[in-house]
Structure formats: structure tokens, C-alpha cells
Image (spheres, grey):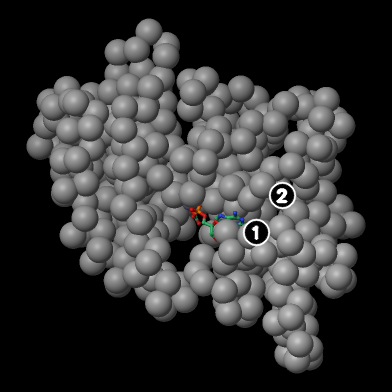
Amino acid sequence: MSTVLAIESSCDETAVAVIKRNEGKVSLLTSLVSSQIEIHRQFGGVVPEVACRNHSQRIAPLIEQALEEAQIELDEIDAFVGTQGPGLASSLLVGFSYAKALAVANGKPFYGINHMEGHLLSPFLSQGFIPPHLALIVSGGHTMLIDVQGYQKYTLFGRTLDDAAGEAFDKVGRMLSLPYPGGPEIEKRAHQGNPSSFKFPRALLKDSSLNFSFSGLKTSVLYEVQRNQNWRDQLDDLCASFQTAVIDCLVGKTVKALSETNHQRISLSGGVACNKALQSALLEQSRRLGCVLEVAPPALTTDNAGMIAFAGLLAFENRSGDPLCKGIDPNWALGE
Ligand code: KG4
Ligand code: ZN
């Protein structure tokens, strides 16, 4: 039996989770997220110094609450893990240092976890192991297609050359005067809109690479808003047309990547994976191609420590990583 406590603080969510594997079966004993979205909403995006201060205030009580909910004592934890990167340096430092200190104080091992690996592994938490597959990770900071041959056997196939998919949702949300974060707001609006109303570009869709680009699409929405004085009357149609353009690019490149592998399985993770229209478009293509689609469960989609705990459990079981001597790594790339 192994029990791991994880801390995630790479951006604006302070999160703590405790995970256990007993006779092969993985259980998430608790996964708490203390969100700062309401605080950052007034600034229209995340303010690093404000995020860091809030992490520092929230971390200790959240750990206490997590231990209580998991009904576990600190000395029953076998390893402590913290998100090492990528993310905001000042935010990462809080959770990473706290997890390290807990490990040292309790004489247990420490592992630094890649936040994107946490997202990548999140659809497989309940299965407890990582099958070979093609992973599409779509978050606020990253958009990646990764060939996964197994645990820690990752090859980057494609990534965004400019804005991440979630970042495009957030920036377009701001242009359309919608609250932060833009993704869920745009999805709600898009539901009532006509996706063919505006002809927005699908950058790189026809090119041979597996990369993405969303900044031209974002600029097209900006031009429409500047040109069309009545855009507020067509807000739902604008959202639907923008969202469909993003989805066409994500799904188109995933299908292309799949044709370059023998994979029969696709995974979808990261905050944008919450988007139901993206899920159903990818499910339709997966069925057409005879593939299984594994979508991260909602609680493990936007930032959380459950996914970091699962990655930490696998790191501990595989004794993978170089425990205490490393610091945070805000630009840690996955699979390159
Ligand atoms: O994975 P995540 O919590 O943070 C990062 O690691 O970046 O992703 C947050 C992103 C935000 O950009 C947010 O707008 C987007 O996920 N998001 C969505 C939806 N829910 C969250 N995007 C589109 N549709 C949604 N329903
Ligand atoms: Zn994330």
C-alpha cells in the first residue's frame, strides 16, 4: 500500500490531495481546491503577486483540512509531492517548498511533478495505469498533442505556436466583455448561437505539421468587434463561430496525429476538456475511427491536486525523479 500527499499551486488554484493505492486499486481519498477565480476576476486575469499571497495564506489550513477529510495522520503518508513546473514562479514556489518541507520534516521522499504530466495522466486515475495512446492536452497555458507509449514515455507531436486554446477562450471572452475565465462563458453563449454566422480562420489546419495557432483567430474576432457596431446583438453567434473554429483545429489535428500512429485510444485533458462541444466532436471522430476516447472526469479537468497526486503516486512507485536537490522549473516542457 502507498499513500501520497500532493500540493498544486502553479497558477491561481491552491490545491491539496491525498491518494492511496491498495492491492492495485487507486483511490483519491480527498482532493481540495481553494479557487482564487473571484479575486482575479476583477483584474480580468491572474495577477501573480496576488496569487502568491493567497497561496501562502491558504496552504496550511488546506493541508490540515485534507488530512482530516482523508482521515489520515501525517506520519502515515509515504511520500510528498508538489508541482515543480510549468507555471508562475511565485505561485509554484509556495506549494513546491511546502511539500518539500513536509517531506524533510517527516523523513519521507519528495517528488517534483510536471503539471502537464498531471493533466496528461488524469483520465487514467481510476484505472491506475497508463496505456499507450494519443493525448490531447488543452489548458489555459498549453495545447499539446503527445504520443504516449506508457508512463514517462512521452513524445511531443505538436503544440501551439502562439496562444493556447484556453488562453484564446479567455482573451476572446475579455474582448466580448464576458467575465474571466472566458471558456465556460463562451461555451454557455455558444450553445444558443449559430456556428456558421461568422467565417473565422482555422490556422494550420491544412498544413502538414501537428501544430496549432490561435492568435490569428483571436485577431479575427477583434476585427469583427471593431468593425461591427451591432456585435453585442450577435454575441451568441460570435461565441459559437469562435468555439467551432477552435474545435475544428483541435479535432482536425488530433485525427491527423492519430493517422501517424497505431493508437486505438485518445485521451482529452486540461481545463478546456470541460467543453462539452469539444468532447462530443472528438467522440464522434473517435467512434468513426474505431478508437476509445478517455476524457478526464470534471473534478480532474481544471487545475487540481488529484491529478498531481496520481502522477506523484506513479513517480513514487517507479522511484522516478531526483528528489530534494532541484528547485522549481517554471518552463519545464513535457515530451521534448
Ligand atoms: O487546466 P487549467 O485549469 O489551467 C491551466 O493549466 O492553464 O485550464 C484553464 C483554462 C482556462 O483558459 C479556461 O477558460 C478553460 O480552461 N476552460 C474552458 C472551459 N472550462 C475551462 N474552455 C472552454 N470551455 C470550457 N467549458
Ligand atoms: Zn493546468
Above or below, comparing residue 174 to residue 130 in the picture: below
Residue at (17, 33) in percent of width and height: 68
Residue at (63, 60) in percent of width and height: 188
**Three-letter code, disc 2:** Ala
Above or below, comparing residue 276 to residue 94 in the picture: above
Asked if disc 1 and disc 2 are in contact, CB closer than 8 Å, the reply is: yes
Q: Position of residue 70 (x, y in %)?
A: 24, 28
Disc 1 Cβ-to-ligand 1 distance below 8 Å: yes
Above or below, comparing residue 273 to residue 132 in the picture: below
Disc number for residue 277: 2
Q: Secondary structure at mark 1?
A: helix
Mark 1 or mark 2: name the one nearer the start of the chain.
Answer: 1
Number of numbered callouts drawn: 2
In depth, the one of 91 and 321 nearer the eye is: 91
Mark 2 nearby-residue class (10 Å; few <14, some 14–19, many ≥20): some
**Three-letter code, disc 1:** Glu
Q: Which quadrant holds the N terminus?
A: top left
Mark 1 nearby-residue class (10 Å; few <14, some 14–19, many ≥20): many
On screen, residue 112 versus residue 179, left or right, reads left
Q: Which residue is mark 1?
A: 187
